[in-house]
Amino acid sequence: MFKQFKKEYVLAFKKIKEYDTIVVLRHQRPDFDALGTQLGLVTWLKESFPQKTIHYFGDNHSTFTPKVYPEMELDMEIEGKFLLIVCDTGNSARIDRGELLKKADYIIKFDHHPGVEQYGNLNIVFNELSSCAELVVDFVDYCGGNKKLPISQLAAKYFYSAIVGDTGRFMFSSANGDTLRCAGRLLDTGLVPADCLFVPMYEKDMTSMTFLKFVLNNMKLSSKGIGYYILMDNDLNELGVNSENGKEHLGTLGSIKGMEIWFCITELKDKGEYRVSIRSHTKDISVIANKYHGGGHKQASGATLYDLEKELPEMISDLEALL
């Protein structure tokens, strides 16, 4: 248990018991951690408090839904007072269905990103964790207990997917003993990921493999060896790839010997911007991400460029300075 959050856990559990209606949200353009934590918590709440009304809103993912996660609930008007729980989202602007912030009676934030914005009435944030799921599982275990309100195999499946996804299958440096102990706790429910989780999470179709060929054929190296690839709007159309999946093969660059920092750029033509996903084995790239309209973790961050011709060379130069 993360003892520093004992008082916060108790208060959060008190609020959960207090409200008859609870809404659980996460960030836009969700990844495994966002969806897995949201749906893991929703499943535990529904199973532990069947008399309560639990809602979960947000966009479906173009790939993970319905292969890994169920369809999201259709938007609806929430009547009366309700508790809002937001997972894995550092700032309010990134919350999917964030308009509910103004309507909620009480807001709890569970997160593992640096504390950019304390938008909750209760903010439970631990930015040293590799995934938000670890924090929520710790909360559930402390307040629910293994016997009183246990984590079911279904909830464990969602939480486990979140941890595996955000740690790159436990390969990122953020994964530590606490991460593995939490994963072990979920496996103790009887969950067998190889049977029900890993195939839908990581299987590739021919579109994905064609996309990988494009990445290998078009990746670039800066003068100091920083690797990257760029997906323009016409590339996405020709490959049949959704912009949401632009970073699907980003990890491939990180597996190249000697590659310390790597990134990918995906054009969002309708918004007039370029989404950047940056990764590193050991260097803190979050400072650079912050400079370019983004942020995130030390070894996994995101940024946004608006003038590719001008900003890309500057960002590469800043990243090279880290080396």
Image (spheres, rainbow, N blue to C red):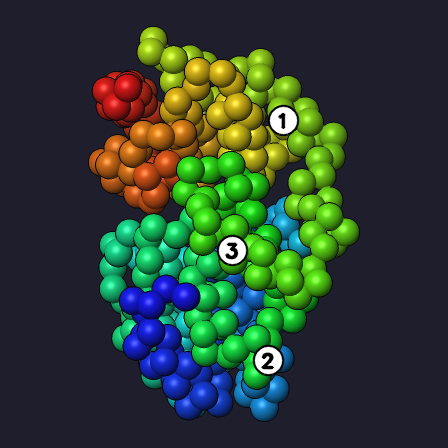
On the image, numbered disc 3 is attached to which residue?
181
Q: Secondary structure at mark 3?
A: helix
- Looking at the image, which is closer to me, 189 or 82? 189
Q: Classify 129 as above or below 270.
A: below
Q: CA distance from mark 3 to mark 2?
A: 18 Å
191 sits left or right of 161 in the view: right
What residue is shown at x 46% (from left), y 32% (from top)?
A: 266
Where the N terminus falls, by quadrant? bottom left
**Residue type at the position of mark 1:** Phe
Q: Which mark is residue 146?
A: none
Q: x and y percent of residue 163 in the render?
A: 53, 51
| Amino acid carrying mark 2 in the image | Lys
Disc 1 packing (10 Å; few <14; some 14–19; many ≥20):
many
**Which residue is the site of mark 2?**
147
Q: Is residue 72 visible?
A: no
The residue carrying mark 1 is 211
Instruction: Please name the residue shown 25% across and 40% down the image.
Output: 290
